[in-house]
Image: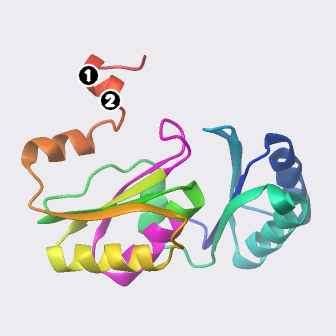
Amino acid sequence: MHPAIAILEFASIAVGIEAGDAMVKRAPLGLIQSGTVQPGKYLILVAGDVASVDEALAAGQEIGGDAIVDRVFLPDVHPDVVTAMQGDRSFGEGEALGVIETATVAAVIEAADAAVKGATVTAAQIEMADGLGGKGYVLFGGVLSEVQAAVDAGVGALTPAQLVASVVISQLHDEMRDDVVASPFFWERVHGGSP
């Protein structure tokens, strides 16, 4: 578990690759993951100690300039956000489900972190980029009042341009809960596998 993470999203794949190279040359990092995402963007995720991530982010921004679509720097990322980013898809039997949908991956990570720090909820699932046209969404489970507080905190961390939508659903139906916890991709749900 790294104490800090940062994400840079680029409109240019070439500039993203150049920025990633500058980032790993500038500071020692515990993790760097990068690659293309829909629709034709380049994404870099770095993690490590706060000072190194901050330095790497500065290097990426220097190279990225106007090609940067969005960014987030979380010097004290909540562990639940990291777990949800890694694919945890369960959100227990809470009485409510909260959803925040964002225009970018960086924004969904920022919203998720603010939400779990602002309320007692489970960050159940974070879906990012591929298969979503570059967007992201995060699901929260818990007591209705806490889920509402989480969604409010997450939305409050975003600009209007970053937010696509947010909802709080009380007493999510069991059949819908099963579908939400399963694969988010319609093709896989209908056909039982990848296209």
Name the residue tied to disc 2.
186
Residue 141 figure quarter: bottom left
Q: Residue, x 89% and y 66% (percent of image)?
A: 62
Describe the element under mark 2 as helix, strand or loop: helix
The span picked out in magenta is: 109-135
- In percent of width and height, residue 66 lies at 83, 60
Along the viewing direction, whichever of 38 and 4 lies nearer the viewer: 38
What is the crowding at mark 1: few (fewer than 14 residues within 10 Å), some, or many (at least 20)? few
Residue at left offset 42%, top offset 73%: 155
Which residue type carries mark 2? Phe
**The stretch drawn in magenta includes residue 128:** yes
74 with respect to 33 (left or right): left
Are the residues flagged by discs 1 and 2 in contact, CB closer than 8 Å? Answer: yes
- Residue wearing tag 1: 190
Q: Quadrant of the C terminus?
A: top left
Specify whether 181 is left or right of 45.
Answer: left
Question: SS class of the residue under badge 1?
Answer: helix
Label 2 crowd (10 A; few <14 / some 14-19 / many >=20): few
Q: Position of residue 167 (x, y in %)?
A: 27, 63
The reply to whether residue 103 is in sight is yes
Placement of the N terminus among the 4 image quadrants: bottom right
Task: Look at the image and tell me whether residue 27 can be seen.
Answer: no
Against 145, residue 20 (above or below) is above
| Residue 119 falls inside the magenta stretch | yes
**Compared with residue 32, is residue 40 higher up or lower down, i.e. above or below?**
above
> In the picture provided, is 19 more to the left or to the right than 118?
right
Residue at the image position 57 percent from the left and 79 percent from the top = 76
Type of residue at label 1? Val
